[in-house]
Image: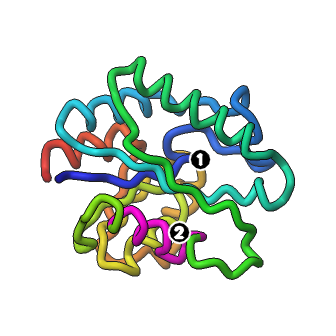
Amino acid sequence: MKLVILDRDGVINQDRDDYVKNSVEWVPIEHSLEAIANLTQSGWRVVVATNQSGLARGLFDMHALNAMHEKMHRLVGQAGGRIDAVVFCPHGPETGCECRKPLPGMVLEIAERFNLKLEGLPLIGDSLRDLEAIAAVGGLPILVRTGKGAKTHMSDALPEGTLVFDDLYDAAEHLIHNY
């Protein structure tokens, strides 16, 4: 099974410094829905793993998060794609949970749920914490320059072997044609 993990904010949809708090603020990045459709149509399974500390901070509730994800699923479906699962961490950074990226808890949960080996498992993200979460388990870190990605790319701390692309579309095309 070919499966790719995607971060959400800054990879699929536009990120906001004040958090994406509702479905109106959830706006797809240009060509991201098409990228997911291309992955799906090429036999890839797509899973989203996203930190959502806005829940812990009281900026939105589960109803609002579900509405964002319903919109995401609907728009991806209209583009001809599918997201097989969404895994999220509802905790704030001070909680010390195992699921919040940069810790690999969500990645481990996805690997267990889909019976995957971790080595080489790709994760596409726009932040160092995304890349660290997958690198910690021997997966393939892929950085996109959308969202916080351009700033992250300037970092000297990228995990070894990190692939870098302009956006999700370009990263998806690389996976489709090379794996």
Tell me if mark 1 has few (under 14), some (14-19) or many (20+) residues whose alpha carbon lies within 10 angstroms of its own.
many
Number of dots carrying numbers: 2
> Which segment did they paint magenta?
100-111
Q: Residue at x 23, y 70 (%)?
A: 117
Residue furthest out toward the left: 178
- Measured along the vertical axis of the image, is residue 145 above or below residue 107? above
- Element marked by disc 1: loop
Q: Quadrant of residue 158?
A: bottom left
Q: Is residue 109 left or right of residue 2?
A: right
Tell me if mark 2 has few (under 14), some (14-19) or many (20+) residues whose alpha carbon lies within 10 angstroms of its own.
many
Mark 1 belongs to which amino acid?
A: Asp
Q: Is residue 49 left or right of residue 170?
A: right
* Residue picked out by circle 2: 128
Asked whether 110 falls inside the magenta stretch, the response is yes
Nearest the camera: 117 or 139?
Answer: 117
Q: Quadrant of residue 53?
A: bottom right
Residue furthest out toward the top: 78
Give how far across and how far down residue 81 sits, in percent.
34, 28
Between disc 1 and disc 2, the foreground one is: 1
Mark 2 or mark 1, which is nearer the start of the sequence? 1
Numbered circle sitting on residue 99: none
Nearest the camera: 46 or 168?
Answer: 46
Mark 2 belongs to which amino acid?
A: Leu
Q: Residue at x 53, y 71 (%)?
A: 155
Numbered circle sitting on residue 9: 1
Nearest the camera: 19 or 128?
Answer: 19
Give how far across and how far down residue 156 sits, in percent.
49, 77
Nearest the camera: 66 or 125?
Answer: 66
- Element marked by disc 2: helix
Residue furthest out toward the right: 58
Asked whether 4 falls inside the magenta stretch, the response is no
Q: Label 1 vs label 2: CA separation? A: 13 Å
